[in-house]
Image (cartoon, grey):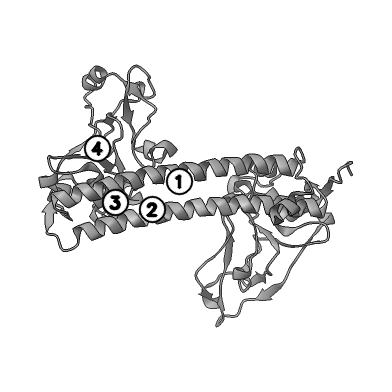
Amino acid sequence: MTSNGWASVPLREVATQFVDRFDVQLGESYVNLGVKWYAEGVFAREPKLGSSIKAKNLYRVRPGQFIYNRMFATEGSFALVRDAHADGVVSNEFPVFDLDRTRLLPDFLALHFQQPAVWERVAQECVGTTKSRSRWKEDRFLAYELPLPPLAEQHRIVDLIGSLDDAIMDAISFETAIVRLRSALVSNAVHGQPLRLMSDLVEVSQGKSLPSRFQSIQTGNFPWFKIADMTTPSNLDGYQVAATYMTEEEILQRGGRVVSVGSVVFPRVGAAVLTEKKRIMDVPGALDENHIILSPKAGTHPEFLLGVMEGIRLSDLAQSGAVPSLNMGLIRRLEVPWAEEGKQEDVAAVLASLRSTLTRARNLAGDLRSLRRELLSALLSGAHRIPETYGELMGA
């Protein structure tokens, strides 16, 4: 026990394994529970009749219990059972524990197991001949030691992180609202208007393959985007940054071309097609062969084009097969809802403003997540304490 009341406590002192095993009845329906990776909570699978379940026994759980997946503990598969899953059941791969709430808050333990550094520590203790057989057994869980502050301090930590979580959820809800508003604006603008042939609105083309020996070089000012760049945080609302930069002359020498600002791009082939990602070029640059490029013709506003494409499901247009793909001829023949030019300009201006706001909302959510990670690590290590006056301050 330290001077501030913190102590290193093995979980066996504050946790007891709960085992409520029962025989599976063939005619009964059961909701099997799982635990998401990265400490993202419990989820419920579709109900199944006992006659469709291979296991002869299952295990009941109760709200407030701590649960984890022995197979995927290394991936952060830890959670609390919440009220919504009170009627669920689990297999023997999901140990369940009751906690001594006079010493340990369930939500405090859940926060501790949200840390990637903890998952790495758990990985070192897993037992098994191969990764698929590796398990973090219950005896290792109960022997695990964690820094445990007094209960009042646990309450303050849980409350403070909870406040951050609320702020993150508010930012995410704001993002969702903006996306829906963009969709509604486009739908209203095209309502009752005739369909237009895509080839009348844009030039349809494809990017050019970039040999691996040229990837990630930094010799110029023009980016050469790969399809993987779509998931880069800076590119979620428009293409801006890439790993590779060249001069325009170098791009032309390697068979590529600089695509102008305002072109709308999306995946052409592979599983990326099914992710429904569309991006607008916020900077001029080249694109790899996995992109389809829509270059607006005169009278086609780029922001409005992006808004319309966001409402089109690429997966409905993809050719079936082992590898999904989009045919450029099909894209050219695609008929899309469109607005008259004057209305298009007005809506496009609002869409551009909303896209800018969406970027700021995403950045805010990202900053809050980073703050949460850093604050959680500091608070759970005992390196920084929350003053006892915190409760009074929040009450005020």
First along the sequence among labels 2 and 4: 2
Determine whether the residue tagged by mark 3 lies in a helix, strand or loop: helix
For residue 211, above or below residue 34: above
Determine whether the residue tagged by mark 2 lies in a helix, strand or loop: helix
Tag 3 and tag 4, C-beta contact below 8 Å: no
Residue 30 locus on image (x, y percent): 57, 75
Give me the disc on residue 279: none
Q: Residue at x 56, y 44 (%)?
A: 369
Tag 2 and tag 1, C-beta contact below 8 Å: yes
First along the sequence among labels 3 and 4: 4
Q: Amino acid at mark 2?
A: Ile
Residue 44 locus on image (x, y percent): 54, 66
- Mark 4 — residue? 262
- Mark 3 — residue? 310
First along the sequence among labels 2 and 1: 2
Determine whether the residue tagged by mark 4 lies in a helix, strand or loop: loop
Q: Amino acid at mark 1?
A: Ala
- Mark 1 — residue? 361
Quadrant that contains the N terminus: top right
